[in-house]
Image (cartoon, rainbow, N blue to C red):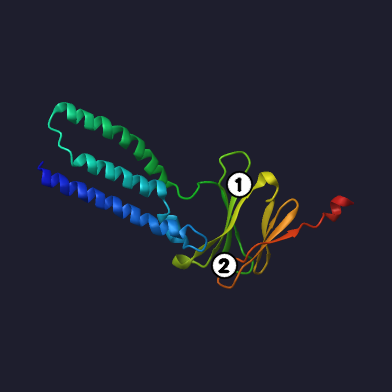
Amino acid sequence: MTARRRRRIAWGLRGAALVALLAYLPGWHASRSGGLVVVEHWLNRPRLLIGAAVVLIVVSLVAELEFRTRFSQIGCAVLLVPLVVAAVPVLSVSLVFSGHGGREDRFVSPNRSDRVLSVTNVAFSIDPVYQVELETGSGWSARHWSLGTWNTRGGDFVRIDWSGPDQITVTGRHKLTVFAVHPDGSLSEPRVLPKQPDVGAES
């Protein structure tokens, strides 16, 4: 293989790496509150896309080198085999699973079917940690709005409910956190209210 052809292959691999990075950017942007659900789901894959870009860049650097002796060829194999062995399982898992892979519960608004609360356990421990989002709209125009991440250990999160046509309430042990849903689906700043004592428990 001539040096010119090796350079063309190397730059082709670098171009593919750039495409992977550019594909990740809209996914990262859509992962923020108010982003498009479909774009975030398919393109917010940092392990897959950034990992693929790193592998392609490394392979492109190796492709430019000329390995004339048997020892240099063996050295190249020793470098690439661990990289491929480590990268393939990680990229495969990232392709199969999206998001955090935890259990997700969904609660549809009783008044509007295009408003859905999603509660996902993102913890890797016994005590659940919930990521709560509101999904509004449908199809390609659906957006997600963050209600925050809630740790159950401190008692701030016991349950979440649709407490009104345009209102969501997170119930904790000692307080209520209330979000109003605007007509466009976005959320107001949370209002924190003291939780009323349970009359039945007092009696």
The N terminus appears in which quarter of the rendering?
top left
User: Residue flagged by tag 1: what amino acid is it?
Assistant: Val
In the depicted view, which residue is nearer to us: 131 or 97?
A: 131
**Is residue 8 left or right of 106 when viewed as pictured?**
left
Give the number of the disc on residue 4: none
Residue 56, image x and y in percent?
28, 45
**Is residue 3 left or right of 152 when viewed as pictured?**
left
Residue 139, image x and y in percent?
46, 66
Residue 107, image x and y in percent?
61, 59
Up/down of 25 relative to 2, above or below = below
What is the spatial separation of the Cα atoms under label 2 and label 1, in whole angstroms? 23 Å
Residue 52, image x and y in percent?
33, 46
Q: Hey, which residue is sitting farthest bottom in the picture?
A: 183
Residue drawn at 16 percent across, 49 percent down: 8
Label 2 packing within 10 angstroms: few (<14), some (14-19), many (20+) = some
Residue drawn at 30 percent across, 43 percent down: 55
Give the number of the disc on residue 186: 2
In the depicted view, which residue is nearer to us: 61 or 173?
A: 61
Q: Which residue is mark 1?
A: 129
Up/down of 1 relative to 26, above or below = above
**How many discs mark residues in the rendered view?**
2
